[in-house]
Image (tube, helix red, strand yellow):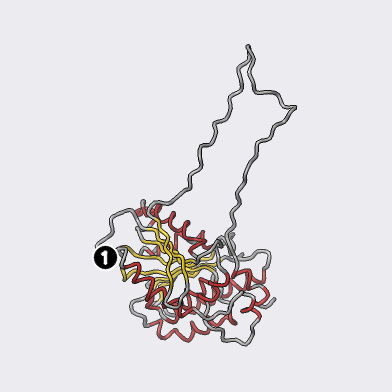
Amino acid sequence: MKGAGQWVAIFASAAILAACGHGTNITNADAPSQAGTADKPAAARPAALGTPVAVTLPSTYEFAMQSAQGKDYKIFVAVPESKPPAEGFPVLYLLDGNAYFIAAASAMKEQSTFAAISGIQPLIVVGVGYPGQYSLNRERRSFDFLPPASSTGTGQFAALGASPGGADTFLDFLVNELRPALASRYPIDLSRQSLAGHSLGGYFALHALLHRPAAFNSYAAISPSIWWDDARLLKEAQAQLPSLTNAKPAVDLLLAVSPQEMSAYPDRSAMMLSGARNMQAILAAAPQGVRMQYQELPGENHISTNLVAMSAILRQASGHRR
C-alpha cells in the first residue's frame, strides 16, 4: 500500500468542475437556402435566446469577514423564507462553502417547503469559504482544518501546499466570532448549531467533536480523511471515550463514506473505508453521548459523496432523525 503522503494532494485539492460551451454561427455555402419561394414557404427559424440574466437564489447573501487573527473569509448565508420559530432557526455551518453552499441552499429551500415529506425543517445554511476564484482553496483549508502534526513524517504535510496547525484557532473563529455575528443579524437558535465537512473538512468535524463536543450539537463528517497524521483521530477517539460517554447533552453524528472513494486506486479506497468503519466502531461504544448515523454510499466517489449526503446533513441539522 502506498503511503498517505503520495496521494494526500488528491484529497486536499479535490474540486467540482463545471464546463460551459459557446457556439458560433457557421454558414455552409452548399447547404440549401432557407428562403422561401412562391410555392414553398420559408422554413421556420428557431426562436432566438433573449439577453442572458444571471441566476440568483432568493434570500441568499454573501459577506466578507476577517477573523481576529487577520484571516479573510467569504461567508455565504441562506435564510428560509418562512416565519422563524420563537426560538429562532437552527443553523448549519458548511465547510468549503465556495464549493457546496449553492447545493445546500437549494436543497434546504426546496425540501423544507415539504417538511412533512422530506423531514427537513427550515434552517439557516452558512457556507464558510475563502476569497478568490477557486471552489476549494487547498492552502487555506489544509491549515484551517488540520491541527498541528504529531508524526515525524513531513512529506504528506508538504503535499498539502501549506503547513497544518490552525484547526483549533479556526474552531474558535466559528464559535466565538462567526456565530455571534450571525446572531446579531438573524433569528438563530443557539441550542441547535450544526457543523458539516467533507474530506479534510470531515477530519475537522471529527476533531471538533472529539475535543470540544459542546461546540455544536450535531456533526456531519463525510468521506473524512481519518488516515491523516498516521490516523491519529482513531487514537484520540479511543482516549476521549470516557468523556464522550458522559457528554450532556448528547450530540448527533452523521458519518458517511463510499466503499469506492477512489475506484482507480483500490488501496486508497480501502484506507478511507477502514478509517470510517474503525471510527464508527469506536464511537458506537458511547451511544449515550454520541447518537450516530453511519452510512456507506456504494457507487459514489470522493467527489460525489458530499452532494449525495446533503439531504441527510440538512435533515440532521434541522433536528429530524430517521
Indicate the position of residue 69 as horizontal and vertical percent values: 45, 78
The front one of 193 and 43 is 43
Residue drawn at (58%, 74%) of the image: 274
Could you tell whether 85 is left or right of 261 in the image?
left
Please tell me which residue is depicted at 61% across the width and 64% down the height of the picture. Answer: 260
Quadrant in which residue 38 is drawn: top right
Residue 201 lies left or right of residue 13; in this view the side is left
| Residue drawn 54% across the image and 83% down it | 148
Name the amino acid, label 1: Glu
Along the line of sight, which residue is nearer the eye, 266 or 302? 302
Residue 53: % across, % down: 48, 44
Helix, strand, or loop for circle 1? loop
Image quadrant for the C terminus?
bottom left
**Residue corresponding to mark 1:** 87
Where in the figure is residue 132, as x and y percent of width and height? 53, 63
* Residue positioned most to the top: 39
Instruction: From the top left corner, tell me how far across and down residue 112 is, in percent.
Output: 37, 54
Could you tell whether 101 is left or right of 152 in the image?
left
